[in-house]
Image (spheres, helix red, strand yellow):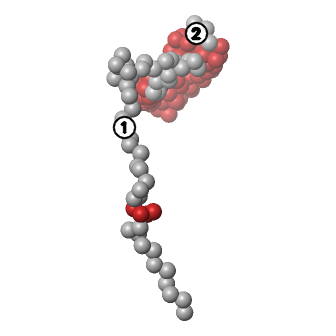
Amino acid sequence: MPDPVVIDMSAPEFAGGGQQQPDFAPPVVPEHASSAPAPIEPSPSGPVPTPPRSGRTGAGVGLLLAATGVVTGGAIGGFWGGLAGLLYAGAVRNTYRAVHRWSAEDPEVKAEAVRSATAAGFGGFLAIVATIQAAARKKPEEEE
């Protein structure tokens, strides 16, 4: 069996003996350089998007408006009254969105305004139909 190989780690070739280690110096900074960071240039792709906080707020207002419409309409006209209240709340919310986006120059925002206005008109029509149904169903009960 051969003898195991033993490596002497204290030998000059392993310990760096005779070889000069490079000196590391900190980089030279010119005297006129400041330590303040450079200003961030705006992106050429457009403004930095903001978090959709207004979307959450708008959704909360819409939910509150819908709940109020359902409860009020339901108290006055039962199922059809609650449905009418919900549809009226949706029509009001869509009308509000359409009015605020109508004068936009961006074609996508303008198209969204048109969709909101169309939904408001259709929802308003359905709300009127539901109101008529609620009134028709309530009259026979009052005559008794």
Q: Which residue carries the number 2 mark?
A: 104
* Residue at disc 2, secondary structure: loop
Q: Residues within 10 Å of mark 1 (few under 14, many from 20)?
A: few
C-alpha gap between disc 2 and disc 1: 59 Å
The numbered mark at residue 143 is none
Rendered residue at 65%/13% (across/down): 107
For the residue pair 2 and 119, the one nearer the viewer reads as 2
For the residue pair 11 and 144, the one nearer the viewer reads as 11
12 relative position to 119: left or right: left
Q: Quadrant of residue 31?
A: top left
The numbered mark at residue 25 is 1
Q: Position of residue 36 (x, y in %)?
A: 35, 21
Residue 13 position (above or below residue 28): below
Residue 100 position (above or below residue 74): above
Q: Amino acid at mark 2?
A: Ala
Q: Position of residue 43 (x, y in %)?
A: 54, 20
